[in-house]
Image (spheres, rainbow, N blue to C red):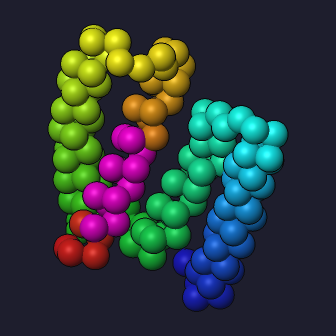
Amino acid sequence: MKPSEEKFLKWFLIALMIIIGFWGLARVISQLQHGEFGWFAALTPFMMLIPLFYNLMVFPHWDMKDERWRRIIERSSYISSQIFILVLAGLLLVLATYPTDWTALQTVLAVFVLYGLTHTVITIVLTKRM
């Protein structure tokens, strides 16, 4: 990628993250003003920030011909899948005792958000360390 394209992509992602962040805050503030707070509805904009942040942090390293990048992706996928299995086991234990009133959709959404966050954080950390 040309340096001008990289700079444009970086600023585009930052602007998009700011817009979506304001949208999310507006949804939260609107719900609080109406006296109710549904975290499920307020979480949607913030879930959209995960892939944008991921792209912002790792786009300089996106060369699929690079062996280092392949190792980073393989290692982060492996670590994320192990954490995902542990979280599913913990979620099974927690939900088996019925302490929450989550619906199946909310539970699946929470698992996907957690997996997205762990994969994003692990990939960013490995990109900086390797």
Image quarter for residue 17?
bottom right
* Residue at 45% across, 23% down: 107
Q: Would you place residue 78 above or below residue 93 in this image? A: below
| Residue 9 visible in the shown view | no
Return the x and y of residue 1 as percentages of the image width and height.
Answer: 55, 78
Quick one: 11 or 36, which is closer to the camera? 36
* Residue at 81% across, 40% down: 34
* Residue at 60% across, 51% down: 46
Q: Would you place residue 52 above or below residue 104 in this image? A: below
| Residue 122 visible in the shown view | yes
Return the x and y of residue 60 as percentages of the image width and height.
Answer: 45, 76
Return the x and y of residue 81 as percentages of the image width and height.
Answer: 24, 38
Residue 4 falls within the magenta-colored stretch:
no
The magenta span reads 114-125
Magenta segment main secondary structure:
helix
Name the residue furthest front: 35
Quick one: 22 or 122, which is closer to the camera? 22
